[in-house]
Image (cartoon, grey):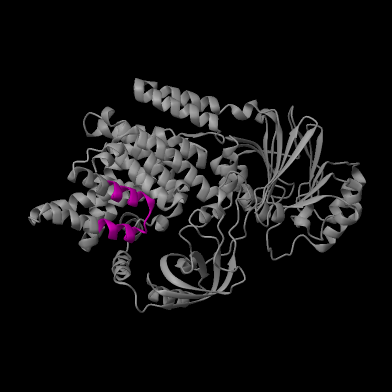
Amino acid sequence: MPRLKILLQSRFFIIATSILLILYILLFTKIITYKSKYDINDTSLSGLLTSYNINGDKLSLTIKGKEDIVANFYFQSEKEKDKITSILALGSKVYLTGNFTKPLNNTIPNTFNYQKYLYNKKIYYVFNASSININSKNISIFYKIKNIILKKVNTYEDTTDYMQAFILGNKNYIASPTYDAFKNNGVTHLFAVSGMHVSFLILALNTIFHKLKIKENIGNFLIASFLFFYMFLIGFTPSVIRASLLYLALLINKKFNLNIPSFNVLYLVFLMFLLLNPFYIYDLGFIYSFLTSFSLIIFSKKITGNYFTKLLKVSTIAFLVSTPITLLNFYEFNLFTIFNNLIIVPLVSLILFPLTLITFIIPFLEPLLNIGFNLLEFINNICNNLSINIVVPKLNIIFLIIYYLLIYLIYTKGFKYTFSIFLLIFSYKLMPYLDSNSYIYFLDVGQGDSSLIITSHQKDVILIDTGGKITYEKEPWQERNKEFNLSTNIITFLKSRGVTKIDLLVLTHGDLDHLGYAEYIIKSIKTKNIMLNNNELNEKETNLVNKAHLIKNNYQSKSINLTNLNYVISKDENTSSLVLYITLKNRKLLIMGDAPKEIEQNIMAKYQLQVDYLKLGHHGSNTSSAYEFLKNINPQYSIISSGRNNRYNHPSPETISNLTKLNLPYFNTQDTGTIEFILKNSQEKIKFYYP
């Protein structure tokens, strides 16, 4: 025992096990590959329901069968929704029919990879359910208690969304605009049940036990038992496991006089995590939680002063050490994050979280709690409106090494050297302007169109169409609290390239699959100029031209020349679609929009064109890409933008036949994902981002 105690206190133990841990993680997460126990051709699934989320007409479930599976079911009517919702219970046996699908990679670079995210959770398939049957008999006592708590939380009319977050750790019920504002303000950690929540609960329990004069050992046992149940209640998220296990480890350390430094105790918890599941190392919550905790322990002697001085120092340290993780995932940070935490953290930790727990027990306090959450949202919106966001291109390993060396400098020399961090970040922001290559991207936006051109030294950023989705009016029961919008991926990708300004947004015509996401993009990224076709403006186009300078038919700079070849005005938007002839770096690009064959004939009659890249019209439909036109243009590469399993069956066999007969190489985004052309003087490189 004494030898073990000395070993656990030593630096050698940390260094030696860290090296072995790295090898262990590489072996079990990178070298060994895992496969599902299910056959993708299976048409049924059964297992234990461990979590679920209802979002409008969509029911998402996590099923524990042979392995964990994510399943989706869509309600066909309000009556069906009410019926299924009334019998849903965690711990139930669920029987589903439908089909398995493999989750997709991120086909737009530098965006969220859903396939990798699920793989790191040991989930290999998504099940699309067409029918569902629930057996709520024989539910275990733990799930029964969890269901009682969940049912009680759902009885609150005005505060259910925040109750779900603070009590059950479920952020999915907070509306997207509100949560996005919290995210931008850098305070979403308040909604991940972690150290703050666990500390308060332990304090409350200790106070109760002291009042009841319960012996310390019995109290500690009861707290430990409660923490294990609480981890189960929250769903064993990394942050709550870290906080709970750290408390228990520190308690053991104190109880047995082991005198192991707090850093070493936290490291043991960290080690235990990764030995049990090495994939935790890729979990964003795990990374934030441990990185911040380690840093606060290291800097603990410097965290002095009154409550607000300490809070400022804690907020600064947490912000500084976690910023690279934020930039690696979101490519921007809010300069006011530190100050936002100074305002919002005390409100939540000292008032709203305790009041939430009290209101859970005493329901008539809900109106007071609702006032508190309204105040929180009011402050959140003000902070969001005042935010100054700094966009930083995708980081490299050299930046990360230098960054954390500067953190060490701050640790040894003091907070006055914080400016060196910001100097590094702002210097790195210049990287795109040093890049002499030009880039052409044909973005995979499903059944839509979007192309991006970035010229050398980022002199011009031109986005041609934005993609979009036709939406239909829904009944109230179908409305979703959160809806994924593909424009998020386009915006994230632009930021990952260091783009803070779009010089020209071209919308070839008024169809939603070409301009549907334009409003979101203009709202997020400053747009100088906009080019539309020559038809009268529709409602969406009218809204857009109020936010950028409208130019007609031509755009020219030192690095690129863009000209519209179609001036036809027609009630048919496709016939009036802009046709763009673009030259850059001695390359010629023709983008056809949705122009039909008659416009192709017009172009052949007026112009003699030879192009390197041809973006085929109308997603490869047989209304475009006539044999004569393709032969006349004779592109080096042809590109089709179409969605996987689209209802129009684009591209048409006729178009593919024409390309094949002419021996013209072509790429289809539904097969290749986003297509990237990297232009360097006379050289050219092609990259694909496969689904």
Residue 170, visible in the rendered structure: yes
| Image quarter of the C terminus | bottom right
Q: In this view of the protein, which residue sits in the foreground, 547 or 431?
A: 431
Q: Is residue 621 left or right of residue 289?
A: right
Q: In this view of the protein, which residue sits in the foreground, 432 or 208?
A: 208
Quarter occupied by residue 84:
bottom left
Residue 244 is a magenta residue: yes
Tell how many labels: 0
Residue 547 is a magenta residue: no
Residue 422 location (% of width, % of height): 46, 26
Q: Which residues are magenta?
A: 226-246
Q: In terms of secondary structure, what is the magenta stretch mainly?
A: helix
Residue 100 location (% of width, % of height): 58, 68
Q: Is residue 677 left or right of residue 157?
A: right
Q: In this view of the protein, which residue sits in the foreground, 371 or 446?
A: 446
Residue 339, visible in the rendered structure: no
Which residue is drawn at the image coordinates 45% and 53% (left, top)? 176
Task: Reply above or below: 410 against 90.
Answer: above
| Image quarter of the N terminus | top left
Q: In this view of the protein, which residue sits in the foreground, 584 or 528?
A: 584
Residue 637 location (% of width, % of height): 81, 46
Which residue is drawn at the image coordinates 28% and 52% (left, top)? 371
Q: Is residue 38 left or right of residue 49?
A: right
Task: Reply above or below: 595 against 127.
Answer: above
Residue 400 location (% of width, % of height): 50, 31
Which residue is drawn at the image coordinates 75% and 38% (left, top)? 685
